[in-house]
Image: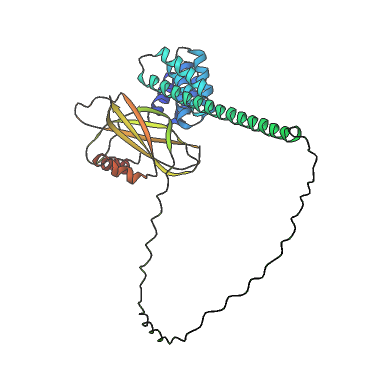
Amino acid sequence: MSTEDLIQQAEEALRAGRAEEAVRLAREAAGRGAPAARCLRTQADALVRLGRVAEAEKALSALLDLRPDDAWAYAELARLHLAAGRMAKAEALLRRAVELAPEDLTLRTDLERVRQMGSTRDSEKEAGNRAIWIALAVLALLAVAALILALSGVFGKSPQPSVQVTVPQPAPQPQVVQPAPEPPPQHEVTQAPPPLPPAPKVVEVQEPPPPPPPPPPPPQQPTARVLWLRCVEVPQLEFHGEGRVRRVYQMYGEVLNESDQPLAVGVVRGMLLVGNQAAGYGLAEVQNVPPKGRAPFNFYAYQLAVEGAPKPNNYGAIVIPGFRLNQAFQELGAYGQFLEHILGTSGL
């Protein structure tokens, strides 16, 4: 088998979603003398899909040493740095990718998103530093005020000598005894006894039952978002059931749980776009994402075989915390029923 056959098999395995096989075939082709840049690109793409970040970074760096004008390699390496939290490095690599491929709308969107994330972090850092300086200034003012009060208590007043003044007491006046007045004569008055009060009426008062306790507030769902996302078209697949699928795309990336509580369950909904209109969907469920943690996802999105439907030119994805797949299917209505049927019959 020639090296060209090997590298073509590696690329076909990658398009079919067999990333592990694609890595093995690309490395074998490179060992037999196939073009190094083509082999490295296939390896890097497959390693990213497998989540083997360190190996993917090495392959992309080696590819850029051979082809410093490869916009795709810059973009993939930028997304790996973004996932690791290295914002400045990711922005610099994406800026270089946009310079090499200014017509790529996805690269421009990714660069603007990274810039917004960087500005948000800088604002939070500046606000935190300002709060620290204000607290230090208040503490310094309190210390100065306490020192002034202490010094005024020690040096502000000198002790005064005490003077005792003796005031003469007036002489006592003799008391004049007045004769007691005679009491007035008493007359006997016969009074009738007062009437007895009526007996009190006993009234039974029934207390109303206590109101039922208010229902507990609904649990607060964690907040999560898609940290990074890739979308690759795969070969046409045949399905049984109602209708056919026009195009199939593999969507993969990572979810970031931004809250301080774990994300027990959630659904990632991917969208294929023609302009600003949705042309297809795909769904995946993520579970048990720790606070501030990340979780990978990998699923297929489908565009229905509608006559004259153009090919999608953009894509995106959102996270719906607290949802399960059956709820996501119901929310998409008739398309969700068709998508549930496809997933159930194809096993993808």
**Placement of 216 over or under 159, stated as above or below:** below
Camera sees residue 258: yes
Look at 28% across and 35% down and name the residue there. 238
Image quarter in which the N terminus is found: top left
Camera sees residue 38: no
Look at 59% across and 31% down and name the residue there. 135
Which residue occupies the foreground of this view, 181 or 13? Answer: 181
**Placement of 69 over or under 127, stated as above or below:** above
Q: Residue reaching furthest left?
A: 307
Q: How many numbered discs, if any?
A: 0
Q: Position of residue 173 (x, y in %)?
A: 71, 61
The quadrant holding residue 251 is top left
Look at 37% across and 45% down and name the residue there. 324
The quadrant holding residue 99 is top left
Q: Position of residue 41 (x, y in %)?
A: 45, 20
Image quarter in which the C terminus is found: top left
**Placement of 98 over or under 83, stated as above or below:** above
Which residue occupies the foreground of this view, 23 or 183? Answer: 183
The quadrant holding residue 95 is top left
Q: How is the image coloured?
A: rainbow
Which residue occupies the foreground of this view, 159 or 14? Answer: 159
- Is residue 134 toward the left or the right of residue 191 in the image? right
Q: Position of residue 281 (x, y in %)?
A: 31, 34
Q: Position of residue 306 (x, y in %)?
A: 21, 31
